[in-house]
Amino acid sequence: SGTYEFIKAEKRGEKGNVGLIQLNRPKALNALNDGLMKEVGEALTQFEKDDSVGCIVLTGSERAFAAGADIKQMQSQEFAGVWRGNFLSHWDQLTRANKPIIAAVNGFALGGGCEVAMMCDIIYAGENAQFGQPEITLGTIPGAGGTQRLTKAIGKSKAMEMVLTANRMSAQEAEKAGLVSKVFPVDKVVDEAIKTAEKISSFSKITVGMCKESVNAAYELSLKEGLHFEKRLFHATFATNDRKEGMTAFSEKRAPNFTDS
Ligand code: CO8
């Protein structure tokens, strides 16, 4: 893992099979400037390439996951420039990762911070987490999925209310609404995310990748197309050594030894 200005990246877990990316711009509550998002992309590329890493955890500090896109960086921008440069379009690199990403969210996850968490595959929240889309207070609108992924995650009425009022949602409400899968004490959430990531990393990377791809297809495809896609991937697992090993190990009452092949 290289040296970064705005993030920290290291391998964690007993077997070093978890890639941990920590947003580290504490004075600005991890506001997501261009440099920070570029570094997240670089760390992600490293962990995607690293065969020993099976799952990635993205976190911030105990006070803030991220308080949004960098407002000071956006303040002086004008329409023609952001349109021509397709401003912030590179953020979606997170959504193209093959390996699963768990967001471990403490404190503020606002605007782009909430959107980045929603780009991840699983969200764990600390008890102090607060999710919100306050863009409307700045005269702008969510631009990285806040009107789309949030609506799919918690439904129209709750999403509409958050986007139109800027009201924040607590960790407990977010769990109830299905935005996050589990809530933990603040000082435990990263460890719990790493534990889950270690478990995911213990399975075949091929199978993990197929599970992720297939669940994500549910967001894009009709039920009929999605079921067809799933069935084809299911059939494809029968071409892998790891499917054979998994079923053989079960029959022989022993632990499987997956080789990612
Ligand atoms: N951008 C830049 N700086 C920020 C940001 C931000 N989003 N959030 C906080 N900071 C800075 C503050 O300016 C302050 O800096 P300084 O000490 O130099 O004044 C420092 O962080 C600490 O913040 P506060 O003093 O405000 O701390 P408080 O505890 O009083 O308040 C809050 C914390 C409530 C989180 C408050 O900082 C806040 O409201 N922040 C802005 C939240 C926000 O509106 N976020 C949405 C931004 S817009 C956005 O994300 C659009 C996304 C579009 C993405 C499109 C991608 C394609």
Image (cartoon, rainbow, N blue to C red):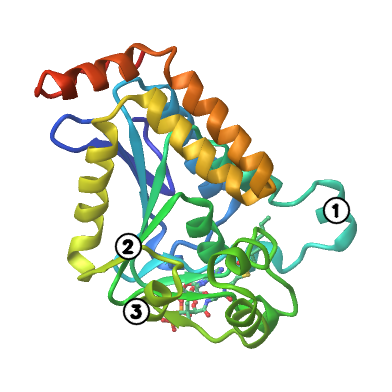
Q: Is residue 191 visible?
A: yes
> Residue at coordinates 46% horizontally, 81% vertically from top-left?
169
Left or right: 123 as drawn, with respect to 85: left
Label whose residue precedes the other's in the sequence (3 or 2): 2
Residue 4 lies in what quarter of the image?
top left
Position above or below: 240 against 117: above
Residue of label 1: 83
Q: Amino acid at mark 3?
A: Gln
Q: CA distance from mark 3 to mark 2?
A: 19 Å
Residue of label 3: 172
Label whose residue precedes the other's in the sequence (2 or 1): 2
Q: Secondary structure at mark 1?
A: helix
Measured as percent of width and height from the top left, residue 93 is found at: 59, 40
> Residue at coordinates 87% horizontally, 48% vertically from top-left?
84
18 or 89, nearer to the observer? 18
Q: CA distance from mark 3 to mark 1?
A: 38 Å
240 or 44, nearer to the observer? 240
Neighbours of disc 1 within 10 Å: few (<14), some (14-19), many (20+) = few
> Residue at coordinates 90% horizontally, 56% vertically from top-left?
80
Left or right: 258 as drawn, with respect to 96: left
Q: Amino acid at mark 1?
A: Trp
- Which residue appears farthest toward the left when viewing the image? 253
Position above or below: 257 against 69: above
> Residue at coordinates 40% horizontally, 80% vertically from top-left?
173
Neighbours of disc 2 within 10 Å: few (<14), some (14-19), many (20+) = many
Q: Which mark is residue 61?
A: 2
Measured as percent of width and height from the top left, residue 235 is found at: 49, 22
Measured as percent of width and height from the top left, residue 133 is found at: 59, 75
Ligand 1 lies under 8 Å from the Cβ of mark 1: no
Q: Secondary structure at mark 2?
A: loop
